Image (spheres, grey):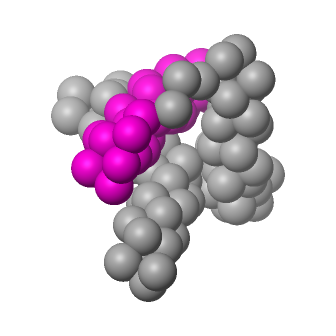
Amino acid sequence: MLGTTAPVWGLLLLGLLAANAPFLTERRLFVLPARGSKPLGWRLLELLLLTALMIGIGTLIEMRLGQRSPQGWAFYVVMISLMLTFAFPGFVWRCLRRGG
């Protein structure tokens, strides 16, 4: 049983780190240098791209553990909401405390 729960917890931890990553760097898409402070729109775009990456990694883990279940629209809404919730500490640190 432990063999199937460890990847899930690892994915949640990776999601927490990925959701806060756009708020920890000033580079656009984590590669391109930004002139000045990166706007919130770029950070949200990066968060959306990282959400898609997390869904892909979760799908790979699910296929490796067993049969992949089909997902409806509600799954994607919940995933976006989860990533926005995970991103809250980074948003507070970058946009509210530091004023950037």
Chief SS of the magenta region: helix
67 left or right of 38 in image? left
Where's residue 80, x and y in %? 67, 32
Range of magenta residues: 39-68
* Picture residue at 75% right of the left edge, 49% below the top: 85
Q: Residue furthest front?
A: 67
> Measured along the vertical axis of the image, is residue 71 above or below residue 63?
above
In this orientation, does residue 85 appear? yes
88 left or right of 90 in image? right
> Measured along the vertical axis of the image, is residue 56 above or below residue 89?
above
> Measured along the vertical axis of the image, is residue 61 above or below residue 80?
below
Q: Residue furthest bottom?
A: 2
Number of marks: 0
> 55 or 14, which lies in front?
55
46 left or right of 79 in image? left
* Picture residue at 54% right of the left edge, 48% below the top: 19
Q: Residue furthest left?
A: 31
> 98 or 49, which lies in front?
49
> 100 or 87, which lies in front?
87
Where's residue 50, x and y in %? 43, 35
Where's residue 4, x and y in %? 42, 70
Q: Is residue 63 magenta?
A: yes
Where's residue 74, x and y in %? 76, 23
